[in-house]
């Protein structure tokens, strides 16, 4: 059967005009949004300012609210506190909830209330922050999830629309990120190919290393993930910022986008120092063991050595 078309062509023209007007109006008057983010391990309160500033700049100088995932560390040289952070993240991967999860649930609900029922919350998570987000998602209602977009970097858990009805999920992983050793779902995707959610968008994306250093590549503000963060910022601006806002903010985002460089990131300097300390702790006894073993063998050879008697002519 043929589709029934209006017998007056001008009705089609009016319909298309209304649709075009609605599209342009949505660009001029985009929906309300709220940007939030949650950090990974080893972040003291004073370490939240730099990432918050960079995220805000990348997304067009919009306000960003963070939900601080507190560290057990008391100073930058507190290795025991760093180790406790890692242990806590491991237990959270096994489903253990904590006060950090409670705080994030409240944080996301406050953001949803601020943007209203037609608004959208853009939530960024990094490392342990992703597993905290994964646990928080289990406590959110379906209608709440549908108004939240998740952007995860080097997450200790993958977050996908096949598990939660979020408006959008995207998980970025550097191919040499050490976190992949404890995220089987991401490793499976890396080996098998692509992972899609409810729509056509790929939800787990692997990034080539920009530094060659696994510890560096795990840092949110280091070149590998920063490149993806800047791309997400451009996407956000194209969808949620008005054309006027984009023109004004372009003057600020352009210098950052054109010079992806090393940003100071305390947590990963601590990681490097921590691994170096562990290496030294392990290598010193090993070196002593090898030295003692060699000396033992040489001493035995000396004890068993019998000089060849000289021949008298």
Image (cartoon, rainbow, N blue to C red):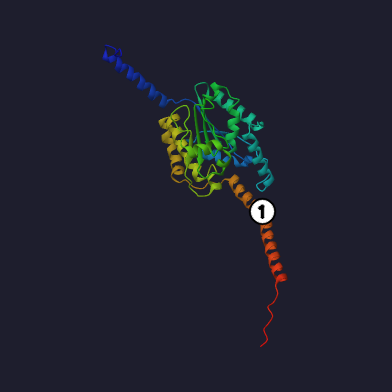
* Direction bottom: furthest residue: 313
Asked whether, in this view, residue 131 is left or right of residue 23, the answer is: right
Q: Is residue 147 above or below residue 214?
A: above
Q: Is residue 103 visible?
A: yes
Q: Quadrant of the N terminus?
A: top left
Q: Position of residue 211 (x, y in %)?
A: 50, 49
Q: Is residue 139 above or below residue 10?
A: below
Q: Position of residue 137 (x, y in %)?
A: 58, 27
Asked whether, in this view, residue 94 is left or right of residue 240, the answer is: right
Q: Secondary structure at mark 1?
A: helix
Task: Examine the image and state in which quarter residue 202 appears.
Answer: top left
Q: Position of residue 21 (x, y in %)?
A: 36, 21
Q: Position of residue 256 (x, y in %)?
A: 46, 43
Asked whether, in this view, residue 89 is left or right of residue 243, the answer is: right
Asked whether, in this view, residue 281 is left or right of residue 15, the answer is: right
Q: Quadrant of the C terminus?
A: bottom right
Q: Is residue 229 visible?
A: no
Tag 1 residue? 282
Query: In this figure, what is the number of numbered marks?
Result: 1
Q: Residue at x 55, y 22 (%)?
A: 142
Front residue of 37 and 34: 37
Q: What crowding class fits label 1: few (fewer than 14 Cα within 10 Å), some (14-19), or many (20 or more)?
A: few
* Direction right: furthest residue: 303
Front residue of 47 and 182: 182
């Amino acid at each position: 059967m043929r589709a029934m078309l209006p017998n007056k062509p001008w009705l089609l023209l009016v319909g298309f005009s209304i649709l075009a007007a609605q599209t342009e109006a949505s660009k001029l008057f985009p929906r309300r949004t709220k940007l939030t983010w949650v950090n990974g391990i080893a972040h003291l309160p004073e370490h939240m300012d730099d990432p918050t500033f960079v995220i805000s700049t990348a997304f067009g100088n919009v306000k960003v609210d963070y939900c601080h995932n507190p560290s057990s560390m008391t100073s930058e040289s507190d290795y025991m506190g760093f180790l406790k952070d890692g242990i806590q993240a491991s237990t959270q991967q096994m489903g253990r909830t904590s006060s950090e999860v409670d705080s994030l649930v409240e944080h996301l609900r406050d953001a949803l209330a601020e943007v209203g029922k037609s608004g959208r919350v853009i939530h960024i998570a990094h490392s342990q922050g992703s597993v905290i987000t994964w646990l928080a998602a289990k406590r959110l209602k379906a209608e709440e999830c549908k108004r939240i977009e998740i952007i995860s970097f080097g997450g200790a858990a993958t977050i996908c629309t096949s598990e939660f009805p979020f408006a959008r999920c995207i998980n970025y992983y550097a191919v040499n990120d050490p976190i992949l050793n404890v995220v089987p779902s991401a490793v499976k995707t890396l080996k098998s190919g692509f992972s899609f959610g409810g729509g056509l968008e790929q939800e787990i994306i692997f990034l080539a290393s920009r530094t060659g250093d696994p510890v560096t590549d795990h840092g949110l503000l280091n070149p590998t993930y920063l490149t993806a963060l800047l791309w997400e910022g451009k996407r956000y601006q194209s969808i949620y910022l008005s054309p006027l806002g984009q023109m004004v903010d372009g003057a600020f985002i352009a210098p950052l986008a054109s010079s992806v460089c090393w940003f100071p990131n305390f947590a990963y300097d601590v990681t490097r120092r921590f691994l170096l300390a562990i290496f030294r702790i392990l290598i010193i006894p090993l070196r002593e063991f090898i030295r003692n073993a060699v000396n033992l063998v040489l001493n035995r050879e000396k004890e068993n050595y019998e000089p060849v008697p000289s021949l008298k002519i």
